[in-house]
Image: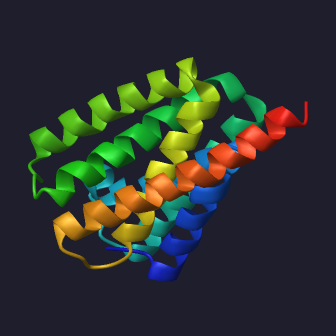
Amino acid sequence: MKLTPLIYVVIGILLLVGGRKFFWFFVGAIGFITGFTLADHLLGVESFIMSLSVGIIAGVIGVAIAVFLQGFAIFVGGFLAGSYIAYMIVTSFGLVSQEIFWIAYVSGGIVGALLLFLLFDWALIILSSAAGGSIITDSFTLEPMMETAIAIVLALLGILIQSKILMKEKKSF
């Protein structure tokens, strides 16, 4: 079950170009997409409205954490982004067993959290760009290899855009 492609594309583009600049949006968007996507895995939810509600609640919690508890939000945002990216990689290769799903989800989350904690700006640029690219390609029905290739190109484009913004900001100091 998916949201309309337009919502995925808008969220993905915003993450590609502004994920580092708007950390609260990054955490909220990742919370929303993760909550919506995993509602059926975690809760066995098959209703679109219930999945949407879980996504909205997770997104609002993510924004609140990002605004009021930034240190914790770094961990949560990194974990969720890493998890989502790992989930997209595993499913793009057709590996959908529950065991592989949870191993990829947890290990991707740990890697994402560590990266974001240790290398905040650059990890946020990379994670938000990779998540944005994955979210955009997830909104279309593509062959797995084509989906992965397009997601990588979009992620690289997002990294380029956000790194230029970061360098411009550092020069102005």
Looking at the image, is 83 positioned above or below residue 96?
Answer: above
Q: Residue 74: x and y, percent?
A: 60, 29
Would residue 19 be visible to someone looking at this image?
A: no
84 and 2: which is toward the camera: 84
Looking at the image, is 146 positioned above or below residue 27?
Answer: below
Q: Quadrant of residue 112?
A: top left
Q: Name which residue lies at 29% across and 54% down.
A: 88
Q: Name which residue lies at 35% across and 73% down.
A: 47
Q: Quadrant of residue 37?
A: bottom left
Q: Quadrant of residue 125?
A: top right
Furthest-front residue in this view: 171
| Residue 19 placement, left or right of 92 | right
Would residue 47 be visible to someone looking at this image?
A: yes
Looking at the image, is 107 positioned above or below residue 82?
Answer: above
Q: How many marks?
A: 0
Q: Name which residue lies at 24% across and 76% down.
A: 142
Looking at the image, is 88 positioned above or below residue 117?
Answer: below
Q: Name which residue lies at 18% across and 66% down.
A: 144
73 and 89: which is toward the camera: 89
159 and 48: which is toward the camera: 159
